[in-house]
Amino acid sequence: MNASTVFKKHSLIPALIGAVLAYGVFTLTADNSLERQQIETLENRIQGLELLLTQKEDQLNRARSFSFGGSLQQRVAGEVRHATSNLKPTTESSPPSINNEQDSSEVAVNVDQKAKDLSTRSDRDARSIVEKINDFLATNPSQENIAIASKAVVDMADNNENLSNDALTSLYQNQTNADMKRVVAQVLSTRGDNSLIEKQISEAQTHLKNSNPLERQKALVELAKTHHASAADTIAPLLQDADTGVKLDALLALRATGNQSHVRLAEALVNHPDPAVSWLANDVVNSLQNLSDKARTRLASADIVSELPILN
């Protein structure tokens, strides 16, 4: 499905929501048993939703479509779904499932405990931390276990005794999962050693010259996840890519990795004839202007946590 088709489909969102809202108001006013307060609450919510739709339609008209961690249209659709989910009167709403809350809590506790086990030395286990993590992933390299092992490594970012720089390098060399390798490289960067993160960037750079635009976009996504300023210089040439989708993803990747010293790269596209490109370029400029020219040259834990693998 091309970008134009996606955009046209999502332009129908206001019409569909309008129909839903009209039906909701009719139903409520027809039911004399509902209190006036509920109707007033609904009307207020409708006004808020109409304002939200107006704002988002304006963004859609200016920015058409682009993708990276979720397209603009997907984010709009998500916000609309969230807004409409609150339109039910209070008397009809159901309380959250206690079982679901308990399940989520149990999963979180289980993940924390497994991560803690991986990052803790024990007299009953002679293995090093690196050996424990390697064995853990060798047994079952599932997405869940990758997330757990990644969390364990991040938790030891300030613990050079249990996980030294040499140990991190060894762990990096023994892993094949891209997410795991990136997390290890990022943790080493928090300690002032950017050798592994620069290696990650160099490896991703080779795919930026792929003749397939989709492969170039995938490489840009991986570079964005590093959140390191060195990636911004690697991304720069793709800002002039002939493919608009690649150009937009390059801007988004620049926003995720650049700092004040890279503002000029985005400024070159502020007056681009494509409104999607010019709108996003302006946004990138505004974002990077708030960062010093030293930002992202050494990663912070928050940068790593934001890209940890997600548990389903």
Image (cartoon, grey):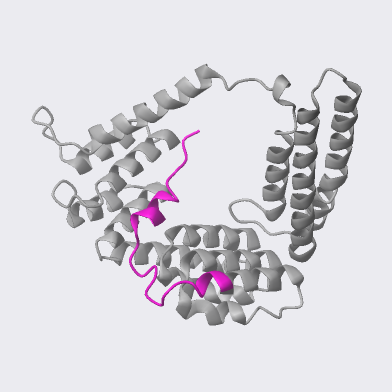
Q: Nearer the viewer, residue 213 or 253?
A: 253
Q: Nearer the viewer, residue 150 or 2?
A: 150
Q: Position of residue 195 (x, y in %)?
A: 29, 66
Q: Residue at x 65, y 66 (%)?
A: 248
Q: Residue at x 79, y 35 (%)?
A: 40
User: Relative to 24, does residue 232 appear above or below in the rendering?
Assistant: below
| Magenta-span inclusion, residue 134 | no
Q: Nearer the viewer, residue 76 or 71?
A: 76
How many numbered discs, if any?
0
Q: Position of residue 21 (x, y in %)?
A: 84, 36
The answer to which quarter of the image holds residue 22 is top right
Magenta stretch, residue numbers? 286-312
Q: Can residue 142 be seen from the camera position used here?
A: no
| Magenta-span inclusion, residue 290 | yes
Q: Position of residue 60 (x, y in %)?
A: 77, 59
User: Relative to 32, does residue 231 appear above or below in the rendering?
Assistant: below
Considering every residue shown, the one lying at the far left of the view is 123
Q: Is residue 46 left or right of residue 181?
A: right
Considering every residue shown, the one lying at the far front of the view is 36
Q: Is residue 157 left or right of residue 57?
A: left
